[in-house]
């Protein structure tokens, strides 16, 4: 029983319970709210999963999203066309990601330290760019894209680009050489380097992709909430990391599946939505989420411990075996 | 294996190229700020007409959505709302985010309340624009929307219950500090978040008041932001005094900010030398007034603000008002109120608290 299967099962159970027992959960409006509010986390979780699999982390994602939204607002106020602004913002995200990646790969710094730094720096730049303004007057058709849903369904328009990106990410991570290389780097960087994987380049590309997706999230965020502010998406990085953790992605690198991460994202999103509908207070919601996280980190490890203990018992029970076979950690 | 790495570099190069290409294509023409019509400034007037003599419906669920739950100020305000709703025989409920700058969280609460089909929402907006889509959705589902304390854009609610005129609040805080300083010296402002609508409006009036000749010997050196967080506000105060050695006074138009600033001043060498005023609650500030750190500060009564929001929401949900200018409604023992321009209802003038009267108040 793999952990990501457990999370997927939990999600299905929760959905069934919510559809069955929670008033106002199953209608199209609520489902679109649920997906719409979870989308930013779901988007960034895709590249974040790949980074974590490769043994890295990026804490600057929320700030990059905020920065791209702030730049979008500032340029819009300057009278630039939105069709020009959005690609510019995406390019900016790519640059932010490249900066992270270059600091990590060229200077050999740990990504945790680098991205804590750039998290503050990018948020600071966002504040300089937009100050205390909030820009709300984006063109209606774009706002409708950001907050509307496909007519006759519960699916927000913005979920379509996510679905495409999710499909691409799953293929890349689980069915190509790039994905295999990422797992190899996460499992053992030296070994990966010795077999000829271009570790640094691959890492740089992953950071760049994370920056790009974060910027896209920032643009969609500003459109969804019809508000570009410098403090948009503050704290988003923690929600993403929480969801990725819950999805069974091991922070030591080299383990995990994107399906698990996506299930983790929607498990947290659905849980929050359902708890709100049944009037669980904000504080209690945080406690529930926290407990769930601790369990999700402990779950797989406890499983491994039990497996090891059993193997040891078998080894001592069989005196003929002089050397216990080393147990592969599941 | 190096093939994969090279292809990843190629992919990023292709990506950058595509983006650049998209730019050049997009640069010719497109949707700009000037080509779209600005949204109308009018506020949301509900369909149907008001009947001032309509009976007050009972058993309505009215939800209070403060900027931040567990913030003492909003706890008092919302309890005032509860008092009004209990008196009218309605059901009160309070939901909200535990952070004062979690707009996405506020939006999802509006969504949840829309789902739960409450009859009215009284909301203090963290951001004037971000809640609009969600609130309009709520109104189109027949839910009445009242903003209190911090307004949204006027077209996203029916009535705004304002604590006092922003102008009176801004100007009177400058007048208070000027009296304490004898109209001379450098002052600074310690605000909440850089994006807080109400704070920025008040600060605008403070700056305007300072332009008057009476204040020619006073100078506003900076506006610092403590994000309505006690620790940040404390550190900002510390920073202000280090950065501006000539600072003589601080105005903090936020209950969290003024308390943190007073806390810092009372334990520093600046106690009694640097004056502090602004908006605070008597219970928060009592000890600082008594030990001489703060001479006087002011506030409206948040309990009454919440109470008025409760009465306004019920009047809307009962069809006694729609939010149009000139309509009148009764608010229990607060008296009767008339809706002004843009659907704004004013609570009244702020109260100044000093060592002579502070013990008469308990909130």
Image (tube, coloured by chain):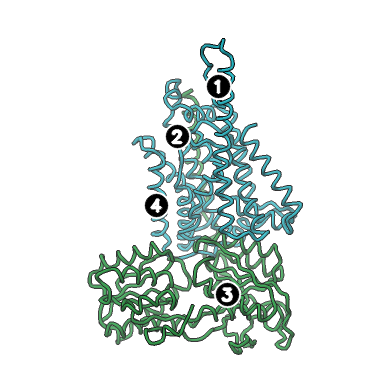
User: Which secondary structure lies at badge 3?
Assistant: helix
User: Which secondary structure lies at badge 1?
Assistant: helix
Q: Are marks 1 and 4 in contact (CB under 8 Å)?
A: no
Q: Which residue is mark 2?
A: A203
Labels 4, 3: front one = 3
Q: Residue A81's spot in the image, x, y percent?
A: 51, 58
What's the distance in space between the residues labelled 3 and 1, CA to CA? 61 Å
Labels 4, 2: front one = 4
Q: Are marks 4 and 2 in contact (CB under 8 Å)?
A: no
What's the distance in space between the residues labelled 4 and 3, CA to CA? 38 Å
Q: Which residue is mark 4?
A: A120
Q: Which residue is mark 1?
A: A312
What's the distance in space between the residues labelled 2 and 1, CA to CA? 38 Å
Name the side, left or right, on which B118 lies relative to B102: right
User: At x 49% / y 62%, what residue is drawn?
Assistant: B101
The front one of B270 and B221 is B270
Labels 3, 1: front one = 1
Q: Which residue is mark 3?
A: B79
Q: Residue A272's spot in the image, x, y percent?
A: 62, 54
Displayed quadrant of residue A278: bottom right
- Of labels 2 and 1, earlier in sequence is 2
User: Which secondary structure lies at badge 2?
Assistant: helix
Q: Are marks 1 and 4 on the same chain?
A: yes
Q: Are marks 3 and 1 on the same chain?
A: no
User: Which secondary structure lies at badge 4?
Assistant: helix
- Of labels 1 and 4, earlier in sequence is 4
**Chain B representation colour:** green
What's the distance in space between the residues labelled 4 and 2, CA to CA? 22 Å
The C terminus of chain A sits in image quarter: top right
**Chain A representation colour:** cyan
Specify the farthest residue to the top: A320
Q: Are marks 3 and 1 in contact (CB under 8 Å)?
A: no
């Amino acid at each position: 029983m793999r952990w990501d299967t457990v999370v997927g099962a939990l999600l299905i159970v929760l959905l069934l319970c919510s559809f069955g027992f929670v008033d106002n959960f199953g209608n199209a409006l609520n489902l679109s709210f649920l997906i719409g509010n979870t989308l930013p986390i779901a988007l960034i979780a895709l590249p974040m999963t790949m980074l974590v699999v490769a043994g890295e982390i990026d804490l600057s994602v929320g700030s990059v999203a905020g920065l791209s939204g702030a730049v979008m607002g500032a340029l819009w106020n300057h009278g630039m066309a939105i069709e020009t602004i959005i690609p510019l913002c995406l390019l900016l995200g790519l640059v932010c990601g490249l900066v992270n990646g270059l600091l990590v790969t060229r200077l050999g710094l740990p990504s945790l330290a680098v991205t804590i730094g750039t998290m503050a720096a990018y948020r600071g730049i966002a504040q300089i760019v937009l100050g205390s303004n909030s820009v709300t007057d984006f063109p209606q058709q774009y706002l409708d894209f950001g907050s509307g849903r496909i007519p006759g369904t519960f699916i927000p328009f913005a979920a379509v680009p996510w679905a495409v990106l999710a499909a691409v990410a799953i293929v890349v991570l689980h069915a190509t050489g790039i994905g295999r290389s990422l797992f190899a780097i996460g499992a053992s960087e030296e070994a990966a380097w010795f077999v000829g994987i271009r570790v640094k380049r691959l890492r740089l590309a992953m950071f760049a992709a994370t920056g790009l997706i974060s910027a896209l999230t920032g643009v969609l965020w500003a459109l969804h909430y019809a508000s570009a502010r410098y403090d948009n998406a503050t704290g988003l990085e923690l929600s993403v990391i929480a969801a990725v953790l819950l999805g069974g992605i091991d922070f030591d690198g080299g383990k995990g599946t994107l399906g698990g991460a996506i299930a983790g994202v929607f498990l947290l999103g659905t849980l929050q939505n359902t708890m709100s509908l049944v009037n669980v207070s904000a504080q209690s919601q945080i406690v529930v989420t926290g407990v769930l996280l601790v369990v999700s980190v402990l779950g797989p490890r406890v499983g491994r411990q039990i497996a090891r203990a059993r193997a040891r018992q078998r080894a001592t029970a069989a005196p003929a075996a002089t050397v216990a076979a080393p147990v592969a950690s599941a | 294996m190096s093939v994969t790495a090279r292809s990843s570099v190629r992919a990023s190069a292709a990506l950058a190229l595509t983006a650049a290409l998209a730019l050049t294509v997009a640069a010719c023409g497109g949707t700009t700020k000037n080509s779209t019509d600005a949204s109308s400034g009018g506020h949301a007037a509900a369909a149907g007409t008001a009947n001032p003599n309509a009976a007050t419906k009972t058993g309505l669920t009215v939800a209070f959505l403060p900027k931040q739950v567990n913030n003492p100020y909003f706890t008092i305000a919302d309890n005032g709302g509860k008092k009004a709703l209990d008196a009218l025989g309605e059901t009160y409920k309070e939901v909200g985010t535990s952070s004062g700058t979690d707009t996405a969280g506020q939006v999802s609460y509006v969504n949840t309340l829309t789902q739960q089909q409450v009859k009215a929402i009284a909301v203090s907006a963290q951001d004037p624009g971000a809640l609009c889509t969600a609130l309009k959705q709520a109104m189109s589902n027949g839910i009445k929307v009242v903003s209190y304390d911090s307004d949204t854009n006027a077209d996203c609610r029916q009535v705004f219950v304002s604590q006092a005129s922003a102008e009176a609040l801004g100007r009177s805080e400058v007048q208070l500090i000027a009296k304490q300083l004898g109209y001379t010296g450098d002052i600074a402002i310690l605000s909440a978040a850089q994006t807080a609508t109400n704070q920025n409006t008040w600060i605008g009036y403070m700056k305007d008041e300072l332009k008057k000749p009476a204040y020619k010997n006073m100078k506003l050196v900076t506006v610092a932001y403590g994000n309505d967080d006690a620790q940040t506000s404390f550190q900002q105060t510390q920073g202000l005094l280090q950065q501006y050695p000539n600072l003589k006074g601080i105005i903090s138009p936020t209950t969290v900010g003024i308390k943190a600033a007073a806390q810092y001043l009372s334990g520093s060498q600046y106690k009694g030398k640097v004056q502090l005023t602004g908006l605070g609650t008597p219970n928060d500030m009592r000890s600082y007034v008594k030990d001489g750190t703060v001479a006087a500060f002011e506030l409206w009564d948040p309990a009454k603000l919440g109470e008025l929001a409760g009465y306004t929401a019920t009047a809307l949900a009962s069809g006694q008002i729609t939010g149009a200018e000139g309509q009148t409604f009764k608010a229990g023992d607060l008296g009767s109120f008339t809706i002004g321009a843009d659907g704004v209802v004013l609570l009244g003038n702020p109260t100044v608290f000093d060592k002579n009267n502070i013990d008469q108040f308990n909130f």
